[in-house]
């Protein structure tokens, strides 16, 4: 019911002219299919950016007037205005919209079939060091609600590798204190069980003691007893990072940190995939490649060749090549 109400609020900005009716029909179809509220918000946000751009271009046509050239121009604009990643997000939203329009008979051909998917440079996020994570944790005092919450949030993110939306969506009655697991709602409405360690359990215990008996079902709350939002989570982490002298602290960076530490501590790629909630091993391979950066250090510790150091010691004195 909340998802339906939120969708109705979000539908107001797009007028029922031009592409407006088609987009509204697309969103209703997406909601009827049972897509998650987050996915619906994604489509709405990206398509609103598209209609805003069309309006600025003076475009007043309908679905049949969408051309590959027009769509490419928008994606180029998004790349320049924001980032290559947002251009790809726009491509995904437009692809879904045009596939719907084709299936509904609103267009004779799908113009997105001729629009190349924007390339995004593969950048590996630099994870935090153990010392930096410790400095973050030191910013939270277990004697206060905010301090205990910070410690619990950082521990859950580092120990479980959750996304920001997943952490904010946690409910206190879905924490299995006996088994030490969390029931997490991931992308596409897919649930998974994620374990946590003893240190995280202690941090959560301390937070729950400060949280008290609040009726709100959400696990992590604001000071006003409301569910923590992604925006508020970002503020909490960046503020803690600034105080700890650690630049660029945000939830997804802690997720990268969790993945790398898991592999360094002996975890395997397949179980990491399940832990992070990835549908394939493609993203996990990036973490494996990053963990392979430790190869130089590991080789120095276990070099087979170094066992023969005495056999290849250079001789002293000047010798002529033969």
Image (cartoon, grey):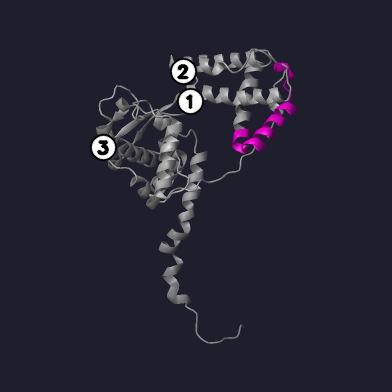
* Helix, strand or loop for disc 3: helix
Q: Is residue 201 visible?
A: yes
Task: Name the residue beneath numbered marker 1.
Answer: 188
Location of residue 282 with respect to 38 vertically, above or below: below
Q: Earlier in the sequence, mark 1 or mark 3?
A: 1
Picture residue at 28% right of the left edge, 35% below the top = 207
For the record, the magenta segment spans 62-87
Crowding at mark 2 (Cα within 10 Å: few <14, some 14-19, many 20+)? few
Which element type, helix, strand or loop, lies under badge 1?
helix
- Residue that carries the numbered disc 3 in the rendered image: 206
Q: Which mark is residue 3?
A: 2
Relative to 96, say whether 306 is above or below: below
For the point 51% across and 40% down, the residue is 283
Q: Disc 2 on helix, strand or loop?
A: helix
Of the numbered discs 2 and 1, the one sitting upstream in the chain is 2
Q: Residue at x 43, y 14 (%)?
A: 1
Compute the Cα span from label 1 to label 3: 32 Å
Give the spatial CA distance, label 2 vs label 3: 32 Å
Q: Is residue 49 found left or right of 57 in the rendered image?
A: left
Residue 221, x across and y down, in percent: 35, 29
The majority secondary structure of the magenta stretch comes to helix
User: In which quadrant of the rendered view does residue 195 lie?
Assistant: top left
Q: Position of residue 204 (x, y in %)?
A: 29, 36
């Amino acid at each position: 019911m909340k998802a339906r109400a939120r969708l109705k609020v979000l539908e107001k900005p797009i007028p029922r002219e031009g592409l407006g009716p088609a987009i509204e029909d697309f969103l209703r179809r997406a909601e009827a299919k049972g897509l998650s509220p987050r996915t619906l918000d994604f489509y709405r946000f990206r398509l609103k950016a598209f209609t805003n751009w069309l309006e600025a271009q003076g475009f007043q046509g309908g679905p049949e007037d969408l051309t590959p050239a027009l769509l490419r121009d928008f994606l180029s604009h998004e790349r320049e205005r924001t980032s290559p990643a947002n251009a790809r997000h726009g491509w995904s939203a437009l692809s879904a919209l045009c596939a719907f329009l084709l299936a509904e008979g609103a267009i004779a051909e799908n113009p997105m079939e001729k629009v190349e998917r924007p390339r995004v440079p593969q950048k590996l996020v630099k994870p935090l060091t153990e010392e930096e994570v410790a400095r973050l944790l030191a910013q939270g005092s277990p004697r206060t609600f905010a301090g205990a919450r910070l410690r619990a949030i950082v521990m859950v993110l580092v120990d479980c590798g959750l996304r920001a939306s997943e952490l904010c969506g946690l409910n206190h009655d879905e924490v299995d204190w006996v088994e030490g697991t969390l029931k997490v709602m991931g992308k596409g409405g897919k649930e998974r069980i994620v374990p946590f360690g003893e240190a995280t359990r202690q941090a959560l215990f301390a937070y729950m003691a400060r949280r008290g008996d609040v009726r709100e079902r959400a696990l992590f709350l604001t000071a006003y007893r409301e569910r923590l939002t992604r925006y508020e989570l970002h503020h909490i982490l960046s503020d803690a990072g600034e105080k700890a002298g650690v630049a660029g602290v945000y939830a997804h960076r802690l997720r990268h940190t969790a993945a790398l530490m898991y592999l360094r501590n002996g975890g395997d790629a397949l179980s990491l995939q399940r832990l992070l909630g990835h549908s394939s091993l493609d993203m996990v391979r990036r973490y494996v490649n990053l963990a392979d950066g430790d190869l130089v250090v590991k080789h120095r510790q276990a070099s087979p060749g170094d066992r023969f150091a005495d056999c290849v010691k250079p001789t002293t004195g000047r010798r002529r090549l033969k």
